[in-house]
Image: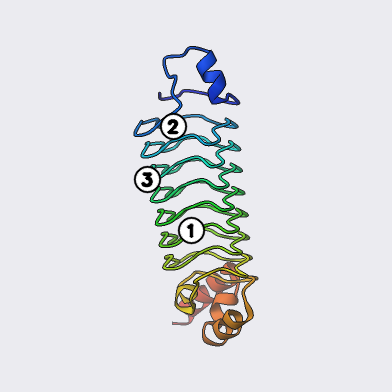
Amino acid sequence: MWGLSLKKLTLKELISKERTFLWLTLKELIFLWLTLEKLNLQGANLEVANLDGADFEEANLREANFRATTLIKADLHGADLQGSNLEGANLERANLRETKFQGANLREANLEETDFIKANFYGANLVGSHLKEANLKEVNLQGTKLFMAKLEGTNLEGANLRGALNLSIDQLSKVRGLYNVKLDEEFLIQLKEEFPFLFKSLKQQFLESQNNLLET
């Protein structure tokens, strides 16, 4: 299926075209670098599929099943994943800018080094997820479950974490930046007292680190 383009097609239309790839369930299939831009795959079962590098830009993936699916370096910019199941999925280094994850299940998903700028996770489940060095700048995390989520080196500049559930000071102390972050008051006060450097912009942090190196 390398190089296959299904742009703007629905699964129903695929069936009507009597192709050799007539599938409603894509479980355990391999589709490397597949182009599915703006495709309607609402409710599709893509469980355990290998979709590394696939293009799902602006696709409708509401309530789709991506459990344990591999999506390394996939492009889901602006895709609609509301209510989808991504438990245990691997989205390392994927492009998820402005993606809609409201109510989605990303429990224990690998989201390391992934770009989530301006994504919406309202009410999503991120319990035990791996967000090391992910970019969550200006992301909406209101009402998100973050128990045991790994946030080491994560950029949370401008993110909205008000009402986030099961979040701890220890988790937030390990992030890369909290500049302009929106947090519940009890977190904000303690973090600013104990980790004031986190509230400096990444640019300011970099400049200060360079100056410190020059002075040594």
User: Mark 2 = which residue?
Assistant: 33
Q: What's the amino acid at mark 2?
A: Trp
Q: Quadrant of residue 141?
A: bottom right
- The numbered mark, 1 or 3, whose residue comes first in the sequence reads 3
* Quadrant in the picture for the N terminus: top left
Q: CA distance from mark 1 to mark 3?
A: 19 Å
Of callouts 3 and 2, which one flags the residue occurring earlier in the amino acid sequence? Answer: 2
Q: Residues within 10 Å of mark 2 (few under 14, many from 20)?
A: many
Residue 112, horizontal then vertical, whole percent: 42, 56
SS for callout 2: loop
Which residue is pictured at 58% across the width and 56% down the height? 121
The answer to whether the residue labelled 1 contacts the one labelled 3, judged by CB atoms less than 8 Å apart, is: no
Residue at position x 43%, y 48% in the image:
91
Residue drawn at (44%, 62%), measured in percent from left and top? 127
Residue 67 pos. (x, y %)? 40, 45
In this view, 202 is above or below 216: above
As drawn, the residue found furthest toward the left would be 28
Write down the residue under mark 1: 134
Of 10 and 175, the residue lying toward us:
10
| Label of residue 68 in the image | 3
Q: CA distance from mark 3 to mark 2?
A: 18 Å
Q: CA distance from mark 1 to mark 2?
A: 22 Å
User: In the picture, residue 40 is in which quadrant?
Assistant: top right
**Residue 200 % position (x, y):** 60, 75
Mark 1 surroundings: few (<14), some (14-19) or many (≥20) residues within 10 A: many
> Who comes first in sequence, dot 1 or dot 2?
2
Q: Are marks 3 and 2 in contact (CB under 8 Å)?
A: no
